[in-house]
Amino acid sequence: MDGAKVQQQGSVAEAFLRSLKRRGIDYVLANAGTDFAPVIEGLVALAGRGEPMPTFLTIPHENLAVAMAHGYYQVAGKPAAVMVHVTVGTGNTVCALMNAARDNVPLLLMAGRTPHTQSGHIASRSAPIHWGQENFDQAGVVREYTKWDYELRAGQPVDEIVGRALDVALSEPRGPVYLTLPREVLADRDTASGALLAPTELAPPQPSTSHMSAIARMLARAEWPMILTSNLGRDRAAVAVLAKLAERHSIPVVQPHPSCVNLPASHEMNLGHAGVELLGKADVIVVVDCEVPWYPRYFTPRSDARVVHLGVDPLWARYPIRSFPGEMAVQGSSRAALAMLDEALAAAGPNQNAAKRRRGAVEDFKRTKREAKAAMLAEARTAKPIRYAYLGDCLRAALPKKSTVVVELGVPIDSLELEEPGSLLGVSIGGGLGFGLGASLGAKLAAPDKMVVSTVGDGSYMFGNPTPFHLVSRSANLPTLTIVCNNGRWQAVESATRVVYPQGLAAAAKPMPLVELQPSPEFTKVAEASDAWTRRVDDPAEVPRALDAALAAVAGGRQALLDVRMEHGVR
C-alpha cells in the first residue's frame, strides 16, 4: 500500500520485480546473461506465490529489444523496460538507444553488473567473463544518450531507485535512463523497509502567455505564415489542435521528414513534405517540434521573415550544433502552445483577405501536385524495377482501417496519405539503422488487434537483426507484415557522395565503391526459417495481389514478408 510501512520478503531481485510492476512497467524486453540468475530465480518465486510482475520476453538481440521498446512507447504511450547482459549487452544497445534519445522516448534500460567479489558470496564470480566483461565505468558507454544513470547498491530501497529512474525518464524532455544491477546486490536478502512512495504525477511545462500573444500578433499581420513540424503528432491529442488552428486561420502546414501523423493527409492546409518548396514565400515561420526545419546549405528564409520555435526543448539542447534563425524560442507543451495561439490569433483579428489568398494558393499548389502524382503513378504501373511511390500508393489502397505503419527508408510517407493520429512511426533522425523491425514488434505488442506493417530498406532489414526479429514475431505471437524495399544498395551513401561531388569521379564510376549490396540475398528464406508467409515481387502488376495475400496471412495470425525489388535512385 502506497505510503505504508512494508516489510519486504525474499531477495532484492524479487523486490525489484515488484517495483517495476508497481511503477507501471508491464513488459521487460530481455536478453539474459550470467548476471540474470537472481532475476530468473525471482521470477519463478513471484509466479509461485501469484504475485503481479512484469511480463518478460526473450529478445535475442539488444538492438532489436531497444527498437521494440521504442515502438511500444510510441503506440502505448507508456514506457517498457529493456534488460541486457552487463557491458557487452549494453554496447549492443547503443545504435537503437541513440534513436530513442533523439526521439525523446522514455525507456528504462537496465543491465546486470559483473560480480564485484571473487569469492565469499553466492553470486561471486563463477566464469572467465566475470573478469573480462568488467569496465571501470560501465555507464560511460551510454551516458551520451541517457538522461540519468545509477548503480543499485547494497541496502538501498530498490523501489525508490526504480521510481527515481522512471520519474527522470518521463520528465520533459523525455528520454532513456540507465540502471545497473550487480549480481550480488540482486541476490542479497531484501532487508529494506519503509514507506513506498506513490508514483509522481509530472505536469507538462506550460508556454509563456505573453510570448504566445506576441507570436499571434505576428501571424495576424502576416501575408504568408507557415507552420513547420516533424514530430508534433507524437502527442496524438495535439493533432486536432493543430488542425483547428490551421483551418481556422488558413495557415499552411509543412512537414519536413515527418516521424508521425501531424495532420490528417486530407486536411486542406496540409502540404506534406512537398510544402518545403513554398518556404521561400513565408514571412512568418512557426517551427514546432522540428529538429531540422530546412537544410541551410540549400535554403535560407527571406531576410525579413520572422522565425519562432516552440516545444518542450525548442533549442534541442542535446544537439551539439544546431543553428537556425529564431527571434523567440518558447519552451512548453506544444499542444498547449498551439491552443493558446489559436485563441490569441482569433482575438487579434487576422487579415481575412490574406487568408483567402493563401487558401487559393494552397489549393492551386495541391492540385498541381495531385496531377503530377497521377501522371507518375500511371507510368509506374508498368515500370520495372518497381518505383517507391507506386509501392506506397498500393500499400495505401490495401491497408485496413486502424493500421499502424512503420517506415524506415521504405516507401515515401506522403504516398501513404495517412489520416489517423498514431498510425505512423517514422525513423528517428538519429539514423541508427535497424529501427523498423523492432519498432513494428513493439507497436504490435502495444496494440495486438491492429494491423502493423513495416516498410524498410534492404540495408535496414539486415541491420534490424532479422533472424531474432522473426523468432520473436513467432514466439511472442506478434504477427506483422514486413515489406523490404530492396534496391540492392546503400542508397543514402550513394546520394551523399553525389551531393558532395556531383561531377566527381565517383559519380561516374560503375559501380560506385562501397555502395552495392549485391548479389542481394533472398530475404524470403530468412523469414521462412521462422514459418513466415513470404513472396518475392519483381513485377509491378503483382504488387496489389501480393499485398492482399500478405495482409490476409497476418490477419490469420502468421507473420509475412514481401521482398520487393525496387528502382535505384532517391526515394
Image (tube, rainbow, N blue to C red):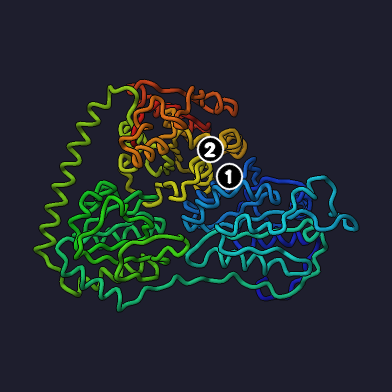
Query: Is residue 263 placed above or below 323 in the rendered structure?
Result: above
Q: What percent of the width, then of the height, locates residue 382?
A: 28, 22
Q: Is residue 519 above or below residue 412?
A: above
The residue wearing badge 2 is 463
In this image, 235 relative to 185: left or right?
left
User: Disc 1 marks which residue?
Assistant: 63
Q: Position of residue 9 (x, y in %)?
A: 80, 64
* Image quadrant in which the C terminus is located: top left
Q: Amino acid at mark 1?
A: Asn
User: Marks 2 and 1: CB-CB under 8 Å?
Assistant: yes
In the image as oriented, which residue stretches furthest toward the right? Answer: 120
Question: In the image, which disc is placed on residue 21?
Answer: none
At a point 58% along the width and 50% down the height, the residue shown is 94
Please report the residue visible at 40 percent of the width from the left and 29 percent of the height from the top.
547
Q: Is residue 416 positioned above or below 270 on the image?
A: above
Label 1 crowd (10 A; few <14 / some 14-19 / many >=20) = many
* Position of residue 31 in the picture relative to residue 96 (left or right): right
Identified at 22% across, 28% down, the residue is 378
Tell me the amino acid under the disc marked 2: Phe
Q: Measured from the top left, where is residue 43 in percent x and y? A: 74, 52
Q: For the point 30% across and 75% down, which residue is it?
A: 211
Give percent across and percent down for residue 510.
Answer: 39, 24
What secondary structure is marked by label 2?
A: helix
Crowding near pointer 2: few (<14 within 10 Å), some, many (20+)?
A: some
Q: Residue furthest left?
A: 353
Q: Is residue 550 visible?
A: no
